[in-house]
């Protein structure tokens, strides 16, 4: 291999603090600089989509600058939601982006075909953040997934098993031993549960605070870092006393302090998780975990916390399990004793970077289609062809098979 591999990371709203954007940022910042040249293209997402944290996060921008990533900002006036591929409106992206400079393109997508990637000729490596579908464009060279659950759902929709693997959002060792108890006026001997979440009304779950309202006592506290303003309204309506809120931040050191404050990582999210970076971070801080099943979305977080957490099927189940965690130190210790080892084995930065490095190298220098892949593509094509024909002309297809 001669020369560095040049990769363009491209993401609408790519400097946000969400898990998908963090995956791209962490990869771009930590790939070995003696082997890779990275340009990171991003734009502000506000006010084009309804996510309060989708604009550039100062802490994530600082992280990228401190890691000497070459940042290239482009402009987009809006998104045409009427188009299947969510085309960008009035963007200067094509004025500043030169595809010929790169060996590979890295992005993160919901799954299906998306603007502007189907217009490019160079190999695209996608991080598939949601189980919304599959991009069947020929330039999709490889697909990363945040969890085995997410990849399995994607494969069911026709994803390529030979050019896909799991690389979760990596997490590092805890960055500090400090905590926020004194700042938040929480006694050292109190038992504290809580979680952190991006600012979005859509993912708000009433379950954690409803459960805490049935358990709250003098030495039990609950903290939420970030999250929808609905949590604050809920806490007020429930008349909670031992509740604390911290404004959203992408500062990794603050998140580490927050996690050091907890005895229990008690999570809730309406649409569930396709991975759950917050759980990997909690495990790296040796915290026992708790979450609930989502009937409106994904449930990969059950696997992400693995043997280090409890899984509630509904709100009543959550109340019972949260009470057990608050009241039983033995249970908390039992769940947390292997948490860090589990996190290091599955979610460490070193593991994730090493795996992605091999894929990038293989995609550039050995991007040939094997016989297995040819057979897979042929089978998928035939399947889609006959299904489509049957849907259009069921009687004709039925008669063909009837005649043998």
Image (cartoon, rainbow, N blue to C red):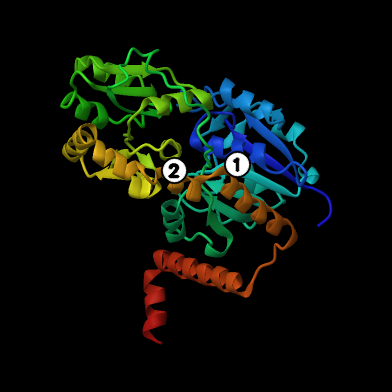
Image-quadrant location for residue 334: top left
**Residue 251 placement (x, y as % from top left):** 53, 24
Residue on which the image places disc 1 = 115
Residue at horizontal 33 percent and vertical 12 percent from the top: 185
In this rendering, the answer to whether 245 lies above or below 16 is above
Quarter of the picture holding the N terminus:
bottom right
Give the residue furthest to the bottom: 404
Image-quadrant location for residue 259: top left
Mark nearer the N terminus (1 vs 2): 1
Which class describes the residues within 10 Å of circle 2: few (<14), some (14-19), or many (20+)?
Answer: many
Residue at horizontal 37 percent and vertical 76 percent from the top: 398
Foreground of the two, 247 or 199: 247
In this rendering, the answer to whether 381 lies above or below 201 is below
**Residue 45 placement (x, y as % from top left):** 55, 27
Residue 332 image label:
none
Tag 2's secondary structure? helix
Quarter of the picture holding the C terminus:
bottom left
Residue 340 image label:
2
Which is more foreground, mark 1 or mark 2? 2
């Amino acid at each position: 291999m001669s020369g560095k591999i040049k990769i363009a990371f491209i993401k609408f709203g790519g400097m946000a603090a969400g898990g998908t954007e963090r995956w791209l940022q962490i990869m771009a910042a930590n790939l070995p600089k003696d082997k890779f040249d990275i340009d990171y293209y991003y734009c502000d997402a506000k006010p084009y989509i309804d996510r309060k944290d989708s604009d550039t996060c100062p802490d994530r921008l600082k992280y990228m600058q401190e890691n000497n990533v070459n940042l290239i900002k482009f402009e987009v006036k809006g998104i045409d939601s009427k188009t299947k591929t969510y085309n960008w409106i009035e963007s200067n992206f094509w004025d500043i982006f030169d595809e010929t400079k790169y060996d590979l393109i890295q992005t993160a997508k919901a799954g299906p075909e998306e603007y502007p990637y189907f217009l490019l000729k160079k190999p695209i490596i996608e991080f598939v953040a949601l189980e919304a579908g599959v991009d069947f464009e020929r330039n999709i060279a490889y697909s990363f997934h945040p969890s085995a659950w997410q990849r399995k759902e994607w494969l069911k929709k026709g994803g390529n098993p030979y050019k896909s693997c799991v690389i979760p959002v990596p997490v590092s060792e805890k960055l500090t031993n400090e905590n926020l108890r004194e700042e938040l006026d929480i006694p050292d001997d109190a038992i504290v549960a809580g979680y952190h979440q991006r600012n979005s009304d859509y993912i708000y779950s009433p379950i954690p605070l409803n459960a805490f309202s049935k358990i709250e006592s003098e030495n039990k506290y609950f903290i939420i870092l970030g999250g929808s303003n609905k949590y604050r309204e809920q806490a007020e309506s429930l008349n909670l006393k031992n509740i604390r809120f911290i404004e959203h931040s992408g500062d990794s050191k603050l998140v580490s302090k927050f996690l050091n404050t907890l005895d229990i990582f008690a999570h809730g999210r309406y649409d569930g998780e396709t991975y759950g970076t917050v759980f990997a971070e909690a495990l790296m801080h040796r915290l026992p975990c708790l979450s609930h099943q989502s009937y409106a979305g994904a449930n990969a977080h059950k696997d992400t916390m693995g043997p280090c957490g409890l899984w509630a099927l509904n709100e009543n189940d959550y109340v019972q399990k949260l009470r057990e965690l608050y009241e039983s130190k033995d249970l908390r210790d039992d769940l947390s004793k292997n948490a860090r080892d589990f996190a290091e084995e599955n979610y460490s930065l070193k593991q994730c970077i090493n795996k992605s490095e091999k894929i990038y190298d293989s995609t550039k220098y050995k991007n040939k289609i094997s016989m297995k892949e040819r057979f897979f593509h042929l089978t998928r094509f035939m399947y889609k062809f006959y299904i489509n024909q049957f849907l259009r002309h069921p009687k004709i297809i039925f008669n063909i098979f009837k005649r043998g």
